[in-house]
Image: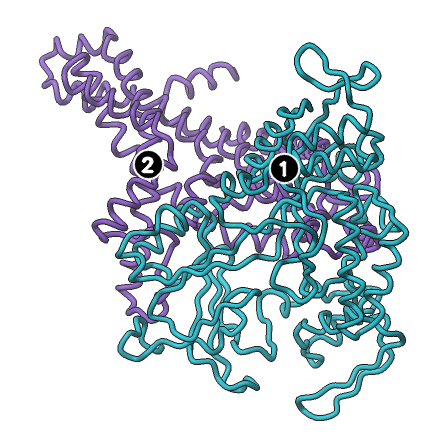
Amino acid sequence: MFAYALRRLILAVPLLIGITFVSFVVIHLAPGEPVENQVGERSTRSDAKLRERLREIYGLDKPLHVQYWGWLTRLVRLDFGRSFSPDARPVLQKIGERLPVTLLLNIVELMIIVMLAIPIGVLSATRQYSVFDKITTVFVFVGFATPDFWLALMLMILFGVQLGWLPISGLRSPTWEYLAFWRQQWDFLAHLVLPITVATFGGLAGFSRYMRQSMLEVVRQDYIQSARAKGLAEGVVIGKHALRNALLPIVTVLGLSLPGLIGGSVIVETIFAIPGMGQLMVQAVFERDYPVIMGNLVIVAALTLVANLIADLTYSLVDPRIRVAARRGRR
Amino acid sequence: MINPKTPTAYAEDFNAVETVEAVDPYTVHIHYKYPNAKALQSWGIWMLPKHLLEAAVRAGKLRESPQNRTEPIGTGPYRFEEWRPGEKVVLTANPDYFEGKPYISRVVYRIIPSSATTFLELKAKGVDGAQLTALQFKRQTEYPAFRKAYNKYRYAADVYVYLGMNLRDPRFADRRVRQAFAHAINKRELIEGVRLGLAREATGPYKPGTWQYNPNVHQYPYDPAKARALLAEAGWTATSADGVLTKNGVPFKFDLLLAQGSDEGRKVAEIIQASLKDIGVQVDIRVIEWAALLKEYIKKRNFETVILAWGITPDPDQYDIWHSSKTKPDELNRIGYANPEVDKLLEEGRSTCVEADRKKYYDRLQEVLADDQPIVFLYFRDGLPVVSSRVRGIVPAPIGINYNFNEWYVPRNLQRYSPG
């Protein structure tokens, strides 16, 4: 298994180069160029010479493969370059200040979804077509169909304006610096409640349905029937034998969700004024801020490759059949 | 600024400077090589700390220096305390400010991308001041609790919206066609529909209430009959079966381009489409993403008509937009306007510093532009700020309310945040 992992990691390098090259070309295919928003296009002042100079500085006048090669050689030295936007700050800095918030929100959201979806899925499967099953089905699908921004605004009006229980937007109160330490943490948590609620409500549907479906398939298997025939308590049959098998596809899905953790939802971020990755990326695309877009892409691509590998390895760890088959295959 | 390694649009302003001398700690004398009226405005920039930036300028790295973003220092009424990107900027009062220390000791700018969220924050008293949208200002803030907690202000902002026409297109090169469009669009109705009345009609590129504004120019009242007559004069006499005017068998139809994301722009476009349909002109609206619109259509002069807006400066010089020499792809005379009288007025207006003389040139400029209608001037939108009613000292002026921010104060018994 170690050799397998090593082989995958080595293969990942040319794969990464391929991904970045194709992405680079596709991004540059979009019409429009970066120097626009820098120079106050809609103001009654401008200078054509400035635009030429900026194009030169960014290397936009060189042919595409030359630009790509330049970017790649800098990347190998872990130099992600500087943003093309007016603040010209290093790309890693811009990503670095937004990534933690996005990661925090996404990880908490994922944990809550998994903690809720597994019981919901199991109970729905074991009590298929019961009232519980029907109600939870409707509930999760309503959550899936509800537009995020509408739900966000409704919750903000109820809990923020009318009841005054929770803060409406941002991550901290304006007077956060003057609060005592524990009040600060409480304040931060309070700001996270609404965004996480909105994000979770929509995401529940996917996982709970996977869980339900997987459980349904497992419960019909012969070995479950033999476990019952042996006289085991239903709780043990379901909770130990069925669940372990039913969780396998969930592990895979979880693994594949890893790259998604660093992408923020731009809608939730915009409504809640949270400075996250979603906003950064959407803005970068509209501004044609190539270094930032490519920076994000590299991170996501690398994460995807790693996450795939982890998912595969975990699956073989969790499912002995795969381990055995691999060993047999090698002989 | 004039160091060639510094990428800036404003080098031109300073290249004409001959000498600069500091006469005393509060006065600087600047000599120019020739009279340049825009000079005063260009010195509205802040002073830069030489001791921190000299090395950066020489290396061509002025843009990347922390002075620009993370640790600026300057001579204004407030000191920079903190910037959390995407979240907030915090300023504290500067006790050494030359006009005296400002009363409000701490200011937090919260960055909130959604106007709906801003509005909810106002209602929940989470923020003390913000700009409202037209709808919020007119319809959603008229209830007693809001009016008690906040004061609403209204002033003409420095932005006007217009219908631009590509003057290289022979149809639009004819002045009568442009004037016909101006008569066909009911500007009052436009303002009512798009801005709920919260805008002022634009008859030219200057704002009413400023010294350079000339109200005595050719007006274009809503008059579809006159519009049709003008079009007929220009040769658009025949009408096809579906009511579209034709000339030499070619129907009068064109594309109206619009930047994506502007709800206001879209409404303007739709109203214009309907207005022009009434006089027999067919307009097809195309919404295009901003960066693409700029690069592929506007810069390549590949457009027929477009809805855009200009931000104007306090100084009336608008050479870059109207002068016939400014028509290269990156330059701002995008419609291709060329009028020798206008060229001369622009040149003379900017080369004298006597306001009375400049007024003569700019008055005449507005008359010519109104006659020519190179673009159809639509409206100056209103700025709609609201501020918590506990803040005193606000004096609205044509430029807005923020100009005397350092004089605003809150009486002690109404203070919400204790000094920290």
Of labels 1 and 2, the one closer to you: 1
Mark 2, residue position: A151
Contact? badges 1 and 2 (CB < 8 Å):
no
Residue A322 appearing in the image: yes
Q: Residue at x 80, y 65 (%)?
A: B11
Q: Position of residue A197 (x, y in %)?
A: 30, 40
Task: State whether residue B144 is above or below residue B104.
Answer: above
Q: Callout 1: few (<14), some (14-19), or many (20+) C-alpha neighbours within 10 Å?
A: many
Give residue B30's position: percent from left, percent from top.
79, 82
Q: Nearer the viewer, residue A145 or A81?
A: A145
Q: Chain of mark 1?
A: B
Left or right: residue A9 compared with residue B220: left
Colour representing chain B:
cyan
Tell me if B258 is positioned left or right of A215 in this view. Answer: right
The purple-coloured chain is labelled: A
The location of residue B342, given as percent across then percent down, is 85, 54
| Residue B150 drawn above or below residue B204 | below
Q: What residue sits right under mark 1 in the picture?
A: B259
Q: Seen from this angle, which residue lies furthest bottom?
A: B24
Q: Measuring 69% from the left and 10% from the top, which residue is drawn there?
A: B241
At x 70%, y 64%, the residue is B212
Query: Is B314 drawn above or below residue A236 in the view shown?
Result: below
Q: How is the image coloured?
A: by chain
Amino acid carrying label 2: it is: Leu
Instruction: Give the amino acid type for the residue marked by disc 1 in the picture.
Output: Ala
Question: Which type of secondary structure does the marked residue at label 2 adopt?
Answer: helix
Label 1, label 2: how many angstroms apart (C-alpha)? 28 Å
User: Is residue B87 at all visible to an observer of this figure?
Assistant: no
Q: Chain of mark 2?
A: A
Q: Residues within 10 Å of mark 2 (few under 14, many from 20)?
A: some
